[in-house]
Image (cartoon, grey):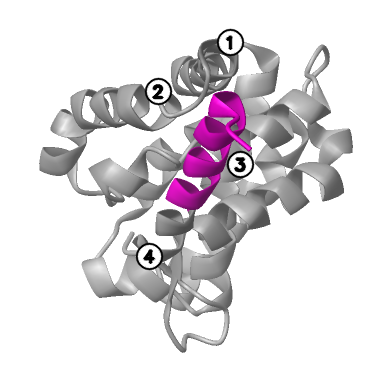
Amino acid sequence: MDNPLLNQRLQFILELDQLKQVQRQTLLLDSSRRENSAEHSWHLAMMAIALAEYAPPQSDLFRAIQQVLIHDVVEIDAGDTFCYDLAAQSEKASREAKAATRIFGLLPAPQADELRSLWEEFEAGTTPTAQFAAALDRLQPFLHNQQTQGGTWKQHGITRTQVMQRMAAVKTGTPDLWNWLLQVVDDCVAAGWIRP
């Protein structure tokens, strides 16, 4: 059966398998290996469900789940950029925009536009939904670093200032968790897992 639209969708689905090969800096909780970007995205989707009551008003839970599942698809081409690597961060947007054009372009036009729009909304971070999704994207590796006694914070000599800059999205995207986060950061500094 010749079905061009189905073929395009299947090609996109098969392409997504490559996200399982993109290694992130974040360690699994047992510290046995680094997580991949597909695992990260799944974990964020589950966090969105579990932490839905902490989302800001006017946020759309289903759309947030879509965003966290799609936000790192561009890493198939662009790779994962370590959040504390400022030099690599400066080129990230252009690499990812090019990747978005190719990867979402595998889909039929209306669906490609819809997924690209979700990704762009997440990247812009101006809607309550995108702010919630971004907060989750910050919280997940934060929790992993806290649970692995500093994990990549210790490995890269990350400071409290760097962590607080990275975690600023939590104050907007999950404001009810901000005071909890500040206490955990202080505890991690006291434990020597984050440099003062």
Q: CA distance from mark 3 to mark 2?
A: 17 Å
Q: What amino acid type should be assigned to the residue bearing mark 4?
A: Gln
**Residue placed under numbered mark 1 in the picture:** 110
Location of residue 5 in the rendering, given as x and y in whole percent from the top left corner: 58, 25
Q: Which mark is residue 21?
A: 4
Which residue lies at the image location 28% right of the left edge and 52% below the top edge? 82
Which tag is nearer the camera, tag 3 or tag 2? 2
Which residue lies at the image location 47% right of the left edge and 17% below the top edge? 120
Which badge, 1 or 2, comes first in the chain's sequence?
Answer: 2
Find numbered disc 1 in the image and state the secondary structure of the residue it sits on: helix
Q: How many marks?
A: 4
Find numbered disc 4 in the image and state the secondary structure of the residue it sits on: helix
Give the dominant element type of the magenta stretch: helix, strand or loop: helix
Q: Which mark is residue 105?
A: 2
Look at the image and give the residue range highlighted in magenta: 1-16
**Residue placed under numbered mark 3 in the picture:** 69
Which badge, 4 or 3, comes first in the chain's sequence?
Answer: 4
Q: CA distance from mark 4 to mark 3?
A: 16 Å
Is residue 147 placed above or below 20 in the rendered structure? below
Q: Quick one: quadrant of the C terminus?
A: bottom left
Location of residue 129 in the rendering, given as x and y in whole percent from the top left corner: 69, 20
Which badge, 3 or 1, comes first in the chain's sequence?
Answer: 3
Find numbered disc 3 in the image and state the secondary structure of the residue it sits on: helix
Which residue lies at the image location 53% right of the left edge and 13% below the top edge? 117
Which badge, 2 or 4, comes first in the chain's sequence?
Answer: 4
Place residue 156 in its image quadrant.
bottom left
Which tag is nearer the camera, tag 4 or tag 1? 1
Q: CA distance from mark 4 to mark 1?
A: 28 Å
Pointer 4 and pointer 3: residues touching (CB < 8 Å)? Answer: no
Pointer 1 and pointer 2: residues touching (CB < 8 Å)? Answer: no
Pointer 3 and pointer 1: residues touching (CB < 8 Å)? Answer: no
